[in-house]
Amino acid sequence: MKRLFSFTMVFVIIMTLFLTACNNNNNVANTPKDETPKAETPKAETPKEETPAEPEKQDSATFDPNVFVPNLPTDTEGELTIWAAWPLDSWAGQFNSVYPNVKVTLVVMDEIEGKLKTALAAGSGAPDIAFLDGGLMGNYNTIDGFEDLLQPQYNAGQYEEFFPASTWQRFMSLDGKQLISIATDIAPAVTFYREDIMEENGFPTDPVEFGEYITDADNFINMAKALKAQDKYLIQWDSEPLSIYTFGIGFFNRNLEWQRNTDQFVKGLDLSKRFKQEKLASNIDFWSDEGTQAISSGKLAMTFLGNWGAEELSMKNPDTAGKFRATNLPFGAFGGWGGASLGITTQSKNKDMAWDFIRLILLNNIYANKENLASGGTPAFLPAYEMLDELEQPNEFLGGQKTGHMYQELITKIPESISTPLDGKAQEIWDKGISNALEKNIDSKTALQNIQDEIEKVLKNDIDKLKAELQ
């Protein structure tokens, strides 16, 4: 009976729908012509196409780095204040090409950190956007002064895969839960060497071949000995071989555990002791007047800097133009020396506008990244390198060498390095401990363990307090 009842009910419903449809069709067919607009006008005038569409949110699957989709109406009015370490007028101009009614005020200062920390602590006076030095993130990654760009308002997490992993992590909060800023660029640490001096002494000169050659520590030492006989040197200080290993590794990890007591650092300290014992260091400071003269004369035939070092060398030593070349660090080490980012302060009253500035300038190929590549820089935004062959010009100071592809590869190999508020105190203890180990020829493992013990003793209260704050 239940099955029969169900069938009957279904049949009744079907017939009802059928008759209703027929009746509706008859009504439409019999509608007078002069009444048709009353029925049709609402459909014809529905402003679906005229209504401003919700801005397209690009994600990793659909993201086109050559297309910028504004989040705000392009006739938006307002003001944006930016604190930066150097003039960004071209960036402001690029932003105004999209938002012509926004006044961009640039405040350029050599030392941002002091004023910025004061403004953040006071709760007033900070800019909308701040230019942050990658090496000083320990000043900001444990305080509540910047917007978390991972929040839905910004949704910056969709861009993570377009940056080297170490670069993205570098600009996060110390606990790894918030993204404080977006990287503008990253400077790989490289070796600058005198190509003419290497050729005169029968060593490889091609940047790729020379880079492979100096990966072997014995090759490097043999070269240092050969040049020392001519009063030429490859390093400034005995501790420099060890320092090369520190370019890519900070003092602490995110759990505030000591990082610099590994086989890698034992190897680096052993190497520094060997340089000291064989007196292979020049003991001339690159940044001094004596160092400038030593570079010009060839007494310093090599130096290790961020990739920005080519410009530094050209300004200090224009007479060496065409003589230097750039390659990777020796001993198989990788690291960075420099880099910066843009962050939005929590005090900003124009956060959406500030985010569109960052999106436009840093997260697309069409503006700052293009400008960066054309000047021989290294954007942190990896899709930008698709334009490398089109934009890169030979570096005349480096004898016409094109470094772009090498730098692109090096930035992807930089290990994760985390800055903390404890780094300043740790640096003092580290320098003192390494100097003592070199002077007294202390076993490297013992010396590194002594430094760790001292760090954990002297900074224990600071470490415990910071851990408690993070939790």
Image: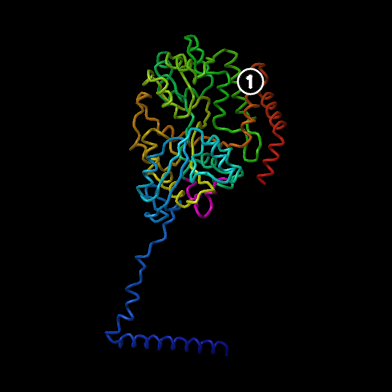
Residue 366 picture location, percent across and down: 36, 44
Q: Residue at x 47, y 52 (%)?
A: 352
Q: Name the magenta segment's main secondary structure.
A: loop
- Please determine whether, in this image, residue 449 is positioned above or below residue 279: below
Q: Is residue 323 left or right of residue 257?
A: left
Q: Check disc 1 and report the residue beneath it.
A: 435
Residue drawn at the location 48% of the way across and 10% of the way down: 231
> What amino acid does circle 1 point to?
Ser
Q: Is residue 187 left or right of residue 452?
A: left
Going 43% across and 47% down the picture, which residue do you hit?
357
Q: Position of residue 185 (x, y in %)?
A: 46, 37
Magenta part of the chain: 145-161
The N terminus lies in quadrant: bottom right
Q: Position of residue 131 (x, y in %)?
A: 49, 39
Above or below, 21 against 231 in this view is: below
SS of the residue at dot 1? Answer: helix
